[in-house]
Amino acid sequence: MTPTAPPWRERLPLRLRRTRVAWDRQRPTWREASPALIAEALGRARARPSGNWYVLGASHALRADRPLARTVAGREVVAWRDPRGHLVAGPGACPHLGAPLGDSPVRCGVLVCHWHGLALTGAPFAGWQPWPAHDDGLLAWVRLDEAGGEEPTDRPPVPARPPASGALSAVYTGFGACEPSDVVANRLDPWHGAWFHPYSFVDLTVVGTPGAGEEEEEAFTVEVSFKVAGRLVVPVRAVFTAPGPRTVLMRITEGEGAGSLVETHATPLTSAAVARPRTAVVEAVLATSDRPGFAVARRAAPLLRPMLRRVAGRLWRDDLAYAERRWELRSTGRFPG
């Protein structure tokens, strides 16, 4: 007779590890984490087109009464919703006397300069010209053709996502002293997960790398367990891809939450000419599950989103240190870049 799984296992995704392995006794991964392999994957990602689109931030950051302001590639950008609720973006300096429009209020969809009252509806006015913008329902994008220097596209390369109606989403934003390529390189090194983030990941094995027979030629495939408490873990299989020069996707393909997606976007804040660059990491988490209890989690989304952002923030506290260290070594000639 084939033994049946305990009832709790059918309801919960948890598994009990047979033994607890000390951090310093886990299997070393440094031989597999080939710098050349990571650099080649990064080079191919940087060669892919972006259409000159940059992620500004979370859609929910665009409130009815104030704009979203950010410097992207050394250009001041201001974004808000026009009287119809559509996303508008353009130069962040008032065309009159250069006031910072990011500090100005929005009244009924009109951005009103707080220095002298010049009102912008989103249409060209007084020398102010809007830039192409797009709101995909989760993230806000702006197209900067001069900064990107590529062939522009009408829409940003938004990846395929799980249906919003069945997903729990959250967006985290962090900042670091590095370039977008350093953030992407961090995400294209899955081998560091259980060593650098032992509070979150255990039993990590990279089972597929680009050009090693994967269905997706540019994929890093990982089997890893998310740590819950003690020996309780949630094992999954995840695939990492880099569809563009500033984006890395992590999809869970097997295990609990199959179909869930983590989008990591790296937006340069400074121009290429500055001595010390700054980059924003905008990470969108879209969690989904076919378990009946997940509907309860979706209903509790306002309470769970801060928790998801905290989890992402803890990981990026370390990963931005990784990216910043990488940039420091590259910029001083101590590491190839």
Image (cartoon, rainbow, N blue to C red):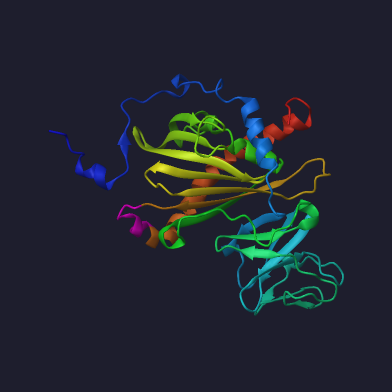
The quadrant of the picture occupied by the N terminus is: top left
Residue at image x 33%, y 30%?
17
Q: Horizontal and vertical percent for residue 49?
A: 69, 49
Q: Please tell me which residue lies in front, 36 or 294.
A: 36
The quadrant of the picture occupied by the C terminus is: top right
Q: Is residue 43 left or right of residue 21?
A: right
Q: Horizontal and vertical percent for residue 168?
A: 44, 56
Residue at image x 16%, y 34%?
2
Give the total number of marks visible in the rendering. 0
Question: Residues in magenta?
Answer: 290-297
Q: Is residue 137 left or right of residue 67?
A: left
In the image, is residue 296 above or below residue 316? below
Q: Is residue 267 magenta?
A: no
**Residue 108 placement: quadrant:** bottom right
**Residue 327 placement: quadrant:** top right
Q: Horizontal and vertical percent for residue 309?
A: 51, 51
